[in-house]
Image: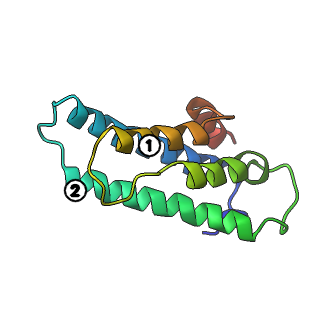
């Protein structure tokens, strides 16, 4: 479904899911960095990182194209647009095939920071559950 057709709750749910996915990857990377990587699938981490990076890039690109289609006070226009574009531009700075190291973890942290800069994870969750 195109972002422009989503309800405020659906947009907030998408953002909340992005933040949760980043946190899950960060937890796995932290285990590797702390040498507690038993059962951690490095290829899964890289695949998830790549998929998440592409999804956020696609959303940011879409928001750039649809900039003037709708001017309102929806969650999409007021809270989602700018943070998704910032996360795409400044987060995920490690390449998708780079080794899993502190730089990799740091790029995830930067993306999470950009996504939750103005609206926290808990606020995104609350927005996604509002009726």
- When the figure is inspected, residue 24 is found, relative to residue 51, above or below; the finding is above
Mark 1 crowdedness (10 Å alpha carbons): few <14, some 14-19, many ≥20: many
Q: Are marks 2 and 1 in contact (CB under 8 Å)?
A: no
Q: Mark 2: which secondary structure?
A: helix
* Horizontal and vertical percent position of residue 84: 63, 52
- When the figure is inspected, residue 9 is found, relative to residue 50, above or below; the finding is above
* Horizontal and vertical percent position of residue 40: 18, 43
- Please say which color scheme the image uses: rainbow
For the point 51% across and 40% down, which residue is it? 110
Quadrant assignment, res 5: bottom right
Q: Earlier in the sequence, mark 2 or mark 1?
A: 2
Quarter of the picture holding the C terminus: top right
Residue 108 — which label?
1
Quarter of the picture holding the N terminus: bottom right
* Horizontal and vertical percent position of residue 24: 36, 40
Question: Residue 113 vs residue 67: left or right?
Answer: left
Residue 48 — which label?
none
For the point 71% across and 53% down, which residue is it? 81
Residue extending farthest to the left is 38
For the point 42% across and 46% down, which residue is it? 21
Question: Residue 9 vs residue 33: left or right?
Answer: right
Which residue position is annotated with label 2? 43
Q: Mark 1: which secondary structure?
A: helix
* Horizontal and vertical percent position of residue 70: 84, 64
- When the figure is inspected, residue 73 is found, relative to residue 95, above or below; the finding is above
For the point 87% across and 54% down, which residue is it? 72
Gap between marks 2 and 1 measured at Cα: 16 Å
Mark 2 crowdedness (10 Å alpha carbons): few <14, some 14-19, many ≥20: few
Q: Say how many tags the image has.
A: 2
Question: Residue 44 vs residue 105: left or right?
Answer: left
């Amino acid at each position: 479904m195109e972002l422009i057709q989503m309800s405020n709750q659906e947009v907030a749910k998408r953002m909340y899911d992005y933040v949760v996915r980043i946190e899950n990857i960060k937890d796995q990377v932290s285990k590797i960095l702390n040498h507690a990587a038993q059962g951690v699938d490095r290829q899964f981490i890289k695949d998830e990182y790549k998929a998440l990076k592409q999804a956020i890039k696609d959303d940011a690109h879409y928001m750039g194209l649809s900039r003037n289609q709708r001017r309102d006070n929806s969650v999409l226009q007021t809270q989602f647009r700018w943070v998704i574009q910032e996360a795409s531009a400044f987060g995920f700075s490690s390449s998708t095939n780079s080794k899993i190291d502190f730089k990799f973890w740091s790029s995830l942290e930067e993306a999470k920071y950009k996504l939750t800069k103005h609206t926290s994870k808990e606020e995104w969750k609350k927005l996604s559950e509002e009726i």
